[in-house]
Amino acid sequence: MTPKNDEEDDSLRLFVQKITKLPTIPVVAHEILNMPDNDLVPVDILEKIVNKDPAISAKIIGLSNAAFFGYHMPHANVASAIQKIGFINVKNIALGISLMTIFGNKPLKLDCDYGRIYRHSIATGFVALRLAGNLGIRPGDDLFLSGMLHDIGLLLLNSYCPELYTKSAEAAQECKNLLEAESLVLGFTHADIGAWLGDAWSLSDTINEVIMHHHTPSHARKYKKTVALVHLADYIACKRSSCMSDQNVHCPLDPLAFSLLDMPEKNLDDIESGISDNLFKDGILES
């Protein structure tokens, strides 16, 4: 995929002008985004914010019980989850879930696609963290959240423009490449519209860079390792998780991702095989 040209910019501009009402950020996400970005925030502040939305808090507790985190005793509440898996992890899980669930109340057919994208997004966040650990890379605080939100553009298209979403998905079945199909049908990709939404929501520069370039890390201007980690995590999650396999559509690997992470391409299979199938079988990935 090549960088956007003026025509693609115009297509995106015309498209977003048709979105008359920007998706409203939920109270939980809004309060988390406004929390001071330091270690001085009392833990009970995050707990109180999350507990304002019982549905979101239940999902957070479920994700905190994932085998990925290595705890055998289940967490019964948000306070326990914070204690066991850490303030930053719970904060990011809460923010990611809160933002993604905006798009969940759709007609049955599209809701099915929402659930598939949601589960894939959660899995990508977990795989990105595991990849960083396997490669000896200290993940930034935004890595897991970046993985969770990388496909927010697909959720936006599915929710606000279902006809175009369906048309581009059908075109992708023909050409077997989602990005090419979106460019043909829409004039831009889900990465472009996702980055626009991330900017409108004032998400971090790291997250927006990942959303924009998660299929093309060679085009990233900064946070290149984070973008490359999510790119490979996205690829692995698509291969290993049944939640995306029904598309039979591929987005090619960007070879530069391997050099950005100082790893030989031939090592990818070994790294992938070292990621437990339990990561994709846990019921916690349910939407």
Image (cartoon, grey):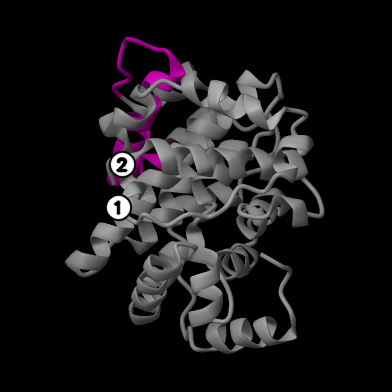
Quadrant holding the N terminus: bottom right
Q: Position of residue 154 (x, y in %)?
A: 45, 63
Question: Do the CB atoms of the residues marked 1 and 2 lie less than 8 Å apart?
Answer: yes
Q: Secondary structure at mark 2?
A: helix
The answer to whether 70 is drawn above or below residue 259 in the figure is above
- Which of the two residues, 68 or 189, is positioned nearer the viewer here? 189
Provide residue 276's location: percent of width, then percent of height.
41, 20
How far from the left and from the top, in percent, is residue 173? 37, 66
User: Who's the residue at 74% across and 38% down the image?
Assistant: 225
Up the image or down, 267 lies above or below 20; here it is above
How would you rate the neighbour count of disc 1 (Cα within 10 Å): few for under 14, some for 14-19, many for 20 or more? few
Residue at 34% from the left image edge and 44% from the top image edge? 56
Q: Amino acid at mark 2?
A: Ser
The tag on residue 242 is: 2
Q: Amino acid at mark 1?
A: Asp
Residue 206 on the magenta span: no
What residue sits 44% from the left and 46% below the top? 121
Relative placement, left or right, of 248 versus 90 is left
Q: Is residue 267 above or below residue 123?
A: above
Asked if residue 232 shows in the view, the reply is yes
Q: Which residues are magenta?
A: 48-76
Horizontal and vertical percent for residue 198?
Answer: 60, 62
Q: Which mark is residue 156?
A: none
- In the picture of the structure, the residue carrying the numbered disc 1 is 246
Q: Residue furthest left?
A: 108
Q: Quadrant of residue 103?
A: bottom left
Cα separation between marks 1 and 2: 7 Å
Task: Using the rendered image of the protein, determine whether residue 45 is visible from the camera's viewpoint.
Answer: no
Pick the front one: 185 or 46? 185
